[in-house]
Image (cartoon, rainbow, N blue to C red):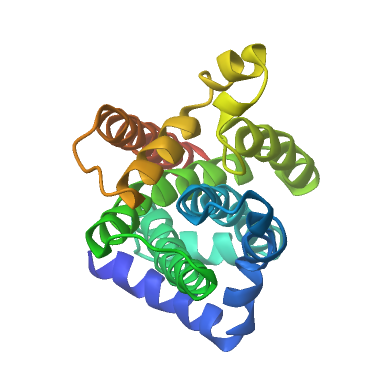
């Protein structure tokens, strides 16, 4: 726990040195919120979807930092310290979750300023559900960044994964409004269920089927992705 806290503080200080980076990390969802969501004119549909998009973009690309740490020998130096490898992962993931929550609150506040009306309890539960989702996605991103050849392939690989997951999740529009084949295909995307759950929470439905299913799948994603990240940290020689 102490080592995790020290790693978290180290990387959080790095992030706070460039505070504008926190805003820039949420820039793409904010642009969609400003220039696309008004066309739909349904803030309780748009904002939850953009929060999941934020998870996929921010936490999904968190491994970029790992690529640079590996390239410049930072991981080798940290490996020589007494800090357990699990702490090296969890400290980074904790920083990513905290930053993402700040960005998520920023998006919600902008949404409220533009006309979003949602129950406070629904918003709070949404933020709670984002924690394991973002943590799992960030852990998986770090695991991919540790793979051989990640220095050159990480960006195109993660873009190839993140873009389809975002589009099929229904983050921009409910998939039921599209063609039948696209709706069926979207059910293979686990993040669709997270989007559906968040929209239900923003509507004030806390125990509906989509909320329970989305919560269960979110926790399953978080557990599986975190296990993948932990395994990668223990198996890779750095």
Tell me: residue 99, above or below residue 59.
Answer: below
Residue 25 visible (yes or no) = yes
What residue is rendered at 63% in x and 59% in y?
29
Left or right for 148, reference 190: right
Q: Single out the residue that lies furthest toward the bottom.
A: 17
Q: Is residue 1 left or right of residue 130?
A: left
Residue nearest the viewer, comparing 3 with 116: 116
Left/right placement of residue 128 relative to residue 37 reads left
**Total marks in image:** 0
Residue 119 image-quadrant placement: bottom left
Residue at 70% from the left image edge and 39% from the top image edge = 163
53 vs 98, nearest the viewer: 53
Can I make out residue 237 in this image? Answer: no
Q: Residue at x 55, y 55 (%)?
A: 54
Tell me the residue at 35%/36% (across/down): 218
Q: Residue furthest left?
A: 207
**Which quadrant would residue 83 be assigned to in this image?**
bottom left
* Position of residue 139 measured from the top left corner of the image (x, y, whole percent): 46, 46
Look at the image and tell me in which quarter the N terminus lies.
Answer: bottom left
Q: Position of residue 171 (x, y in %)?
A: 57, 42
Relative to 98, residue 189 above or below:
above
Q: Which of the two residues, 112 or 96, is positioned nearer the viewer here? A: 112
Quarter of the view holding residue 223: top left
* Rendered location of residue 56, percent (x, y): 57, 47
Q: Position of residue 73 (x, y in %)?
A: 65, 64
Give above or below for 32 relative to 106.
above
| Of residues 102 and 137, the one drawn nearer to the viewer in this rendering | 102
């Amino acid at each position: 726990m102490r080592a995790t806290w020290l790693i978290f503080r180290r990387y959080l200080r790095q992030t706070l040195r460039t505070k504008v980076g926190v805003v820039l990390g949420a820039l793409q969802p904010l642009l969609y919120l400003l220039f696309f969501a008004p066309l739909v004119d349904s803030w309780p549909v748009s904002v939850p979807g953009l929060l999941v998009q934020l998870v996929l973009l921010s936490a999904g690309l968190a491994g970029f930092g790992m690529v640079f740490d590996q390239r410049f020998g930072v991981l080798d130096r940290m490996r020589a310290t007494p800090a357990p490898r699990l702490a090296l992962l969890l400290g980074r993931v904790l920083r990513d979750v905290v930053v993402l929550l700040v960005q998520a609150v920023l998006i919600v506040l902008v949404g409220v300023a533009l006309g979003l009306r949602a129950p406070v309890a629904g918003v709070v539960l949404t933020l709670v559900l984002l924690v394991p989702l973002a943590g799992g996605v960030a852990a998986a991103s770090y695991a991919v960044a540790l793979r051989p050849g990640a220095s050159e392939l990480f960006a195109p690989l993660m873009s190839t994964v993140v873009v389809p997951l975002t589009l099929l999740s229904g983050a921009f529009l409910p998939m039921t409004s599209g063609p039948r084949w696209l709706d069926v295909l979207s059910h293979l995307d686990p993040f669709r269920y997270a989007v559906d759950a968040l929209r239900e929470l923003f509507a004030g439905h806390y125990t509906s089927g989509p909320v329970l299913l989305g919560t269960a799948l979110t926790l399953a994603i978080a557990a599986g992705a975190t296990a993948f990240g932990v395994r990668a940290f223990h198996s890779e020689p750095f």
